[in-house]
Image: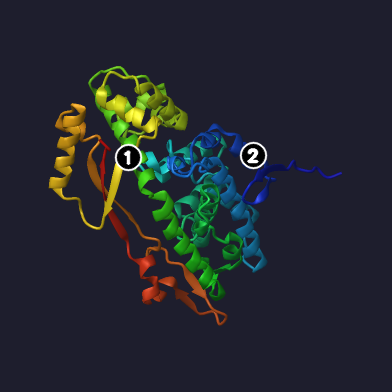
Amino acid sequence: MPHLEKTTVFNDPIYGFIKIEDPFVLQLIDHPYVQRLRRISQMGLSSLVYPGAQHTRFAHALGAYHLMGTAISVLKSKGTVITKQEEKALGYAILLHDIGHGPFSHALERALIADFSHEQIGLALMNSLNQTFEGKLTLAIEIFKGTYPRSFMNQLVASQLDMDRLDYLKRDSFYTGVAEGNINADRLIDMINVVDDQLVIEQKGVYSVEKFLMARRFMYWQVYLHKKSLSAEILLLKSLERAQHLAAQGIDLVMSPQLAHFLQNKPTEINWNQDTQDAFAALDDIDILHAVKQWQAHSDPVLSRLAQMINNRTLLQIELFDHPVDSNTLESKKIETGQTWSLDGDQASYFVFSGKVRNTPYKAGQNPIVFIDKSGKMVSFDSLMEAPYYNALLHPVIRHYLCFPKL
């Protein structure tokens, strides 16, 4: 009687039952690097605006893995040859694609480790896992890095129309209740094909791609860059900056050892080592939340106020502009805040500041989305961008902001 491998099923609210049949995938899922994603919020502090946005990077990783399986099945049904080894590696790559995210996902990216993106950290962790599992992730890492010669595989993992984006748009739309962000992932995947090892979309899928890009544009400005979410995330950054400043002066702060490692040592890409990697792998949202809760009672008036504002959702006011914030306006707000709260100029700068955010839904010339018609002619989505309708997708939108407290 043949041996039947055990199938593990995850019940996902987006796709229903997600079946895991590869025993090694279960080993990866059970590894602390992946289990840590259960304690990393997918949408940072967006739950302060959208209460339902409590989902995690772990759920997203499973969802992206599920979509990758669907994509592989579609491509194989259309004649694309994908070996069993490649099929498994694609699953491993997409499952692990986000393990480099720090607490609260993008909210604190580069805040704890300067000039070291979550993709670079993720690659370091994947290389460590590859050593642990004796080379089983070598092909997955090549696909993730884009060094594997079959380009479409990297495009499925990281491109302008990949399984990562398909899942997070659909998932984030569901949990925020923002219906405009919902996309038909099944329809989009059904339209993919491979020509000369490049990922292409069948011509009849052009309108589905348009909707996908417009949904992404909408979600960025309505959800991901919502001004209250932005205000909360910047407050969190400011609290860590203040804590780092105090730690440099030798002032005691209540925090976990792993958070202390980053605030006291200021690690960078250059001095990334095993101690830093171990500290990062132990760091999650809980460390930040616990620290912020404790810092509410700290003797430093700036840190305690920042922590109280985050914990009680007493967020900064934020105004958006199409032009840089006037320096006189910024300075007058600082003076007013300093006088009201008895703060000096440097202290007031933690509560009054300006900056900018930008988003480009589709980046022309960078790994473009390519369509193929029935005759086999391929056309880049970039060439369609000449139409006025597409201007909103092509051109970056930059918003300048001014944050200040309500006095």
Tell me the mark number nearer the camera, choosing from 2 and 1.
1
Point out which mark residue 26 bears: 2
Point out which mark residue 379 bears: none
**Could one spot residue 113 in this view of the protein?**
no
Q: Can you say which quadrant of the picture contains the C terminus?
A: top left
Residue drawn at 55 percent across, 45 percent down: 61
What is the residue that sits farthest to the right in this orientation? Answer: 1
Q: Nearer the viewer, residue 109 or 302?
A: 302
What is the residue that sits farthest to the left in this orientation? Answer: 328
Alpha carbon distance from label 2 to label 1 = 37 Å
**Could one spot residue 189 in this view of the protein?**
yes
Tell me if 392 is positioned left or right of 6 in this view.
left
Is residue 135 depicted above or below 262 in this figure? below
Please rate how many residues cluster around mark 2, counting C-alpha atoms within 10 Å: few if below 14, some from 14 to 19, many from 20.
few
Q: Nearer the viewer, residue 212 or 232?
A: 232
SS of the residue under disc 2:
helix
Amino acid type indicated by mark 2: Leu
Q: Position of residue 349 (x, y in %)?
A: 20, 35
Q: Nearer the viewer, residue 342 or 239?
A: 342
Is residue 286 depicted above or below 358 in this figure? above
Q: Position of residue 43 (x, y in %)?
A: 46, 44
What residue would you read off at disc 1? 234
Amino acid type indicated by mark 1: Ile
First in sequence, mark 2 or 1: give its number: 2
Tell me if 135 is positioned left or right of 314 in this view.
right
Tell me if 346 is positioned left or right of 109 in this view.
left
Q: Position of residue 327 (x, y in %)?
A: 14, 47
SS of the residue under disc 1:
helix
